């Protein structure tokens, strides 16, 4: 039988809270890089690994037949398929570099996907202790809350008045493209933030503290839970598979979305020929 999105969300929330407690505990001690991944700037700490292991254990105790796709497991080939049709998409610490430096902007992100669609998502802002949660009903309707209160996007202003967050890939050639695109993009918006946690950036679009977010080079675990929160709060989002299979993610209030996306493509955040329909 199809799982109830509310049940999946309840498990996502209790697990994300337990994981956030562990991350908070580790943040109080000395944090060191355990390894580098795709490039020298792509780091993993023991806290990332231990937190992902905790999340995996807590979820599989309740739902042993579900699949699992986690940031740290993925690079070790530990992703499991499962047999229930539910797959958990997990980023134990989104904003690892902030965590490493003690900058208070990092999160635990847990999403549950059923039949290929994200139906529940929890994002815990660890230093602030804030919980963003959302679920989608089988009829397609979705609801999102921040610490139990409904969230809604900000009304979009003129492009020149919008505060947009972005991020930079760990890949050197993509970083160059992003830097060059910024030269053309910054003059057309109010300003650009590089806060360092895609999940929290997207949740900030959901609660109206940012006007939009875009980044090329994301992985599914960075945005899966947060995009459901943003969608339920009135944002539109897309994750287009671009160069080398990397995801170009744009999130913004529904009205005004097209204008932002067009400006991003014109600035060169993604080569036009790799985007369908541009
Ligand atoms: C990163 C953060 C960052 C974004 C990177 C992500 P991680 O996730 O979300 O803001 O710019 O693209 O990889 O590595 O800290 O989980």
Image: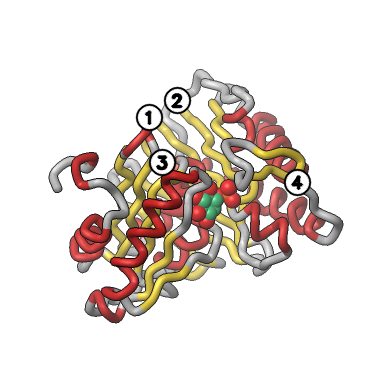
Q: Residues within 10 Å of mark 3 (few under 14, many from 20)?
A: many
Question: Disc count in the image?
Answer: 4
SS label for mark 4: strand
Q: Quadrant of residue 253?
A: bottom left
Which of the marked residues, 3 or 2, is nearer the chain's N terminus? 2
Which of the marked residues, 3 or 4, is nearer the chain's N terminus? 4
- Front residue (pair 194, 27): 194
SS label for mark 1: loop
**Circles 3 and 2: CB distance less than 8 Å?**
no
Q: How far apart, in angstroms, are the residues tagged by discs 2 and 1?
A: 6 Å
Residue at x 37%, y 75% (from the top left corner): 163
Q: Residues within 10 Å of mark 4 (few under 14, many from 20)?
A: some
Q: Nearer the viewer, mark 1 or mark 4?
A: 4
**Circles 1 and 3: CB distance less than 8 Å?**
no
Circle 1 residue: 115
- Image check: 204 left or right of 73? left
Q: Residues within 10 Å of mark 1 (few under 14, many from 20)?
A: few
Q: How far apart, in angstroms, are the residues tagged by discs 1 and 4?
A: 36 Å
Circle 2 residue: 85
Which of the marked residues, 1 or 4, is nearer the chain's N terminus? 4
- Front residue (pair 58, 243): 243
Circle 4 residue: 33
**Circles 3 and 4: CB distance less than 8 Å?**
no
Residue at x 73%, y 64% (from the top left corner): 102
Q: Nearer the viewer, mark 4 or mark 2?
A: 4
Q: How far apart, in angstroms, are the residues tagged by discs 3 and 2?
A: 12 Å
Q: How far apart, in angstroms, are the residues tagged by discs 4 and 2?
A: 35 Å
Q: How far apart, in angstroms, are the residues tagged by discs 3 and 4?
A: 31 Å
Circle 3 residue: 118
């Amino acid at each position: 039988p199809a799982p109830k999105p509310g049940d999946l969300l309840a498990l996502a929330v209790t697990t994300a809270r337990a994981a956030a407690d562990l991350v908070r505990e580790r943040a109080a001690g000395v944090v060191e890089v355990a390894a580098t991944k795709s490039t020298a700037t792509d780091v993993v700490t023991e806290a990332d690994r231990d937190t992902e292991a905790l999340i995996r254990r807590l979820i599989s105790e309740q739902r042993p037949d579900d699949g699992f796709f986690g940031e740290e497991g993925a690079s070790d080939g530990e992703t499991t398929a499962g047999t229930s049709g539910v797959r958990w998409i997990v980023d134990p610490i989104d904003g690892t570099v902030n965590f490493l430096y003690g900058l208070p902007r990092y999160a635990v992100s847990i999403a549950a996907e059923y039949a290929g669609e994200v139906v529940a998502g929890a994002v815990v802002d660890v230093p602030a202790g804030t919980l963003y949660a959302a679920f989608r009903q089988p009829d397609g309707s979705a609801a999102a809350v921040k610490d139990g209160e409904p969230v809604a996007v900000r009304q979009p202003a003129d492009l020149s008045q919008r505060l947009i967050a972005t991020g930079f890939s760990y890949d050197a050639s993509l970083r160059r493209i992003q830097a060059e695109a910024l030269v053309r993009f910054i003059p057309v918006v109010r300003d650009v933030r590089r806060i360092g946690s895609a999940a929290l950036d997207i949740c900030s679009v959901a609660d109206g503290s940012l006007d939009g977010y875009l980044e090329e080079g994301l992985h599914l675990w960075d945005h899966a839970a947060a995009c459901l929160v943003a969608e339920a709060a009135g944002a539109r989002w897309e994750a287009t598979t671009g160069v080398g299979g990397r995801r170009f993610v744009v999130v913004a209030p529904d009205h005004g979305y097209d204008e932002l996306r067009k400006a991003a493509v014109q600035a060169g955040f993604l080569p036009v020929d790799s985007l369908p329909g541009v």
